[in-house]
Amino acid sequence: MHRNSYSLAALAAAAVPGLVPVRTTPVPVPVEDLDVAGVVSEDGRRVMVFSPSTTAAGVRLERDLKVADALSGTPLRAVIPPVLGFVKLAEGGRCAVTESPVGAPLMLDDLQRSSDLARSLGQVLARIHAVPRYAAEAAGVESFTAEVLHDQQSQRVRQVREGGYLPAAVAQRWEALLEDAELWDFTPQFVHGDLSEESLFSSGHRISAVRDWSSAQVADPASDLAWLVSTLEPERFDELHAAYREELPIEPHPRLMERAQALGEFAVAEWLLHGLQVEDEDIVADAQGMIADLDADLAQLGREEAERTYAELSSRDGADDGPTQDD
């Protein structure tokens, strides 16, 4: 069942001894079946309360908290708000209360404007991807091989292509990417799995908190970078990537950024298949529009390449036909 902010405040008071709520604040969340509110106590303390409204949401919340707990012994503990208490719900499951993250949800516009914020995010991403395997295993997250991850992408692209949704140029590009064996020869690492503006908090010019670890897994590190490489200005992303490489204790895959770009494109296929599965025409139309945009971009790149080739040939022919001077 869904709960309003007053009910959530009452749950927070029951879960945390001594907490006396005086007001609540709304908190944006990407999950519809998880009720969340910020609560301010009479002594100024700020907490967040999470109450699942379905069994599935309860499972997701428990997975989130289990991963966060496992990460408390890693360098990521500085950006994970600690859990303060729980309270059982009448319908089953439990509500959780954590300290409120410092700062506010990350805004991409702020990230675009701030070199320091971009570098901070790059450092946090490196710390996520450097989480040791024992911590991932303690959290009970799923682990995938590079081969399985590649097969998953191939299957999605094949479904979309066979459904007649891919223009020839896009199909050729995606198939060429998937056939590039070197691109997919990587070592899986611990990843957040669902990074977005809602899961990241910033304070000043630094990332202050990361939340919602329910999609964490051992998989392709490029998946945590895909949404950034496709949305940030190149200069800002280069700064983020430089900080990421400096912070990462191992050398990243030499083609990590290429794979992140590919995953960003393949996400459109996943979005389209989701729309078809739930029979949502708006989602399908949105995905088809993205595919059309990519097709137009590829056509423009083809024209620009043809123009460069023509200019080089013309310049070479002009040099060959120029006057010669006898000895």
Image: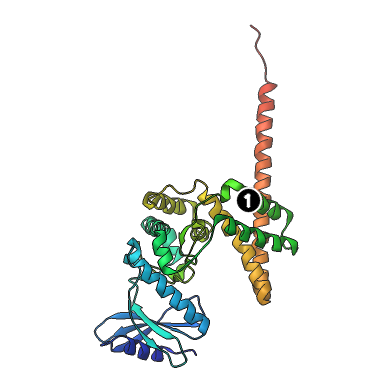
Q: Can you give x and y, in whole percent of width and height, for residue 224 in the image?
A: 49, 60
What residue is drawn where x is 68% and y is 72%? Answer: 276
Q: Is 204 or 136 nearer to us in this picture?
A: 136
**Quarter of the rendering occupied by the C terminus:** top right
Q: Is 280 or 214 nearer to us in this picture?
A: 214
Q: Please identify the quarter of the rendering in which residue 294 is found.
A: bottom right
Residue at the bottom extreme? 90
Left or right of 266 on screen, residue 195: left
Classify mark 1: residues with Cα within 10 Å, few (<14), some (14-19) or many (20+).
Answer: some
Residue at the disc numbered 1: 177
Q: Count all numbered tags in the image, as a single digit.
A: 1
What residue is drawn where x is 39% and y is 91%? Answer: 6
Q: Is 48 or 89 nearer to us in this picture?
A: 89
The answer to whether one can see residue 81 in this image is yes
Residue 44 against residue 295 in the figure, above or below? below
Q: Please identify the quarter of the rendering in which residue 320 is found.
A: top right
Q: Can you give x and y, in whole percent of width and height, for residue 72 in the image?
A: 33, 68
Q: What element carries label 1?
A: helix
The answer to whether one can see residue 202 in this image is no
What residue is drawn where x is 73% and y is 57%? Answer: 167
Q: Can you give x and y, in whole percent of width and height, for residue 82 in the image?
A: 32, 74
Residue 79 against residue 263 in the figure, above or below? below
Left or right of 19 on screen, residue 315: right
Residue at the left extreme? 43
Give amino acid for label 1: Leu
Residue 321 against residue 186 in the figure, above or below? above
